[in-house]
Amino acid sequence: MAQLTGNKKVSTAVFISGRGTNLRKLIKFSRKKNSPISINLIVSNNSHAKGLKFSKLYKIKKKVVNFKKSSLFEKKILQTLKKNKIKFICLAGFMKLLSKKFIKNFRGKIINIHPSLLPKYRGLNTHVRVIKNNEKFSGCTVHFVTSKVDSGKIILQKKVKIYKNDTPKKLSKRILFQEHKLYPVAINKIFRSNS
Ligand code: GRF
């Protein structure tokens, strides 16, 4: 489990592929006095990711690597992480799978947020599938990352009720609202617990 050393914030990178609303919430959280992390790097595999604009807005370094080949992508990213002394990684809408080899470099130090109540509905299009199956609840999960999609130990979850006339769009909006609150709480839980 990740550990805080003294009062120093843990140098963190956030990986994104898209709009970056979770990234923005994490940046705001990291800038609070009591936050255990500081966000020092934004990584993306997509040069068009809307969330990259937060690099300029909040003056945080960014690194875009769009090698198709995963091994090259990971090699480049690892170099950048080392150079920037990154010790913790938050995935936030990052659409590329990380290899076992990469994860080994950051064992227990990579977390992700997923818009379902894992282990149910791993993978993509969760809201569509959840509604199709007439589920009564969905939600979001923050979990440790392993090389299997959306697996790994669960850190925290938040349940969200599904209404009769829900659409994937409406549901995703309500779940995203909860994601923004859950991610910082989960990070606090990791660093503040004594385990
Ligand atoms: C979120 O729903 C997150 O759970 C999923 O991808 C989405 C990213 O949204 N992994 P954003 O880029 O943070 O707005």
Image (cartoon, grey):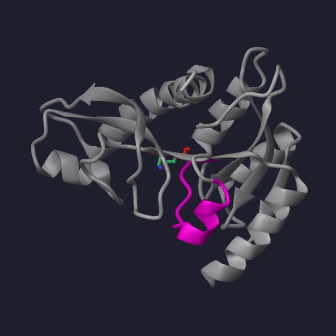
- The image quadrant where one finds the N terminus is top right
Residue 186 spot, x, y in % from top left? 52, 28
Q: Position of residue 63 (x, y in %)?
A: 80, 61
Quarter of the image holding residue 36? top right
The residue at the point 53 percent across, 27 percent down is 195
- Residue that protrudes farthest toward the top in the picture: 33
> Where is residue 138 shown, x and y percent of the image?
25, 36
Left or right position of 136 against 170: left
Could you tell me if residue 43 is visible in this image? yes
Q: From this viewpoint, is residue 67 visible?
A: no
Identify whether 16 is placed above or below 8: below
Q: Residue 92 magenta-drawn?
A: yes
**Vertical placement of residue 10 versus 31, above or below:** below
Whether residue 147 is in magenta: the answer is no
The residue at 31%/37% (across/down) is 171
| Residue sticking out furthest to the bottom | 69
Q: What residue is shown at x 45% (from left), y 42% (from top)? A: 143
Q: Which residue range is magenta in the image?
A: 90-106
Side (left or right) of 129 relative to 56: left
Counting every numbered tag in the picture gives 0
Identified at 35% across, 59% down, the residue is 123
**In the image, residue 77 above or below residue 111:** below
On the image, the x and y values in percent for residue 10 come to 77, 34
Q: Quadrant of residue 83?
A: bottom right
Q: Please, which residue is most extreme toward the front here?
A: 195
Decide if residue 190 is on the left or right side of residue 73. left
Question: Which residue occupies the foreground of this view, 12 or 23?
Answer: 12
